[in-house]
Amino acid sequence: MSIDANEKGKLIIFSAPSGAGKTTIVKHLLTKKLNLEFSISATSREKRHTETHAKDYYFLSEIEFLEKIKNDEFLEWEEVYKGTSYGTLKSEVERIRNQGKNVIFDVDVIGGLNIKRFYGDEALAIFVKPPSVEELKNRLTNRSTETEERIKTRIAKAKYELGFADQFDVIIVNENLEEAFVEAEKIVNIFLES
């Protein structure tokens, strides 16, 4: 069933360098009464043992991913690391919006800006900033999921991504997670009520 364009849900985009806390904030917001549904991204990377297909990501082979690019099925996509691509399927976003729900995204920085450009005022783009690059390195190291080489790659990418922060509608500095939760809830509520 299709609904009136005025009843379609809005879009809330969370972007940040890896380890800044965007996923934790998004998961927190999903527990609140904000009529949010998570936009599940597609990826060509390997599934981690803690992840579930169609819940954490749509896990696609590199060939499947390339086929969807060719067929213009992505709202945005990027090869984030060599051989590892992430993207937002147009069908996923419209599925959620057509139910009258608000779509919440947990996407990389360039992807977030691309979604914002596509949807304009229907979308709120939020950048989650770590208190410092040093703190970001500590968080990535404490995860114990990455090699030292991968951490170096992620830190180099984070330094680059921090340069895009001022292109987002709002910046949340995640120094204290509880305070970041409160700030995110307030910002999202104001946007959804406008």
Image (cartoon, rainbow, N blue to C red):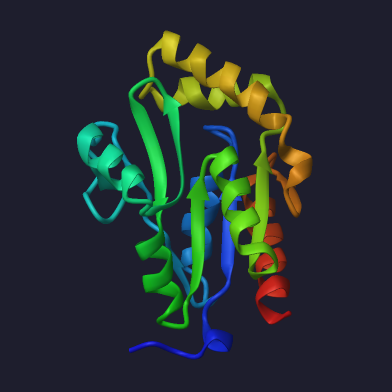
Query: Image point 38% across, 50% down: which residue?
Result: 41
The answer to whether 25 is drawn above or below residue 11 in the figure is above
Q: Nearer the viewer, residue 14 or 183?
A: 14
Q: Where is residue 93, by image quadrant?
A: bottom left
The answer to whether 35 is drawn above or below residue 161 in the figure is below
Where residue 6 appears, x then y in whole percent?
58, 87
In this rendering, position of residue 173 left or right of residue 87:
right
Where residue 187 appears, x then y in whole percent?
71, 64
The answer to whether 134 is drawn above or below residue 143 in the figure is above
Query: Image point 21% across, 50% down: which residue?
Result: 53
Q: Residue furthest top?
A: 149
Query: Image point 66% across, 55% down: which residue?
Result: 125
In this rendering, position of residue 146 left or right of residue 11:
left
How many numbered marks appear? 0
Query: Image point 64% across, 70% down: which residue?
Result: 122
Where residue 100 appears, x then y in whole percent?
47, 83
Q: Give the quarter of the figure containing the C terminus.
A: bottom right
Q: Nearer the viewer, residue 70 or 29?
A: 70
Q: Residue furthest right?
A: 166
In this rendering, position of residue 74 left or right of residue 181:
left
In this rendering, position of residue 85 left or right of residue 193:
left
Where residue 8 appears, x then y in whole percent?
52, 81
Q: Where is residue 59, by image quadrant?
A: top left
Q: Give the quarter of the figure containing the N terminus.
A: bottom left
Q: Nearer the viewer, residue 94 or 135?
A: 94
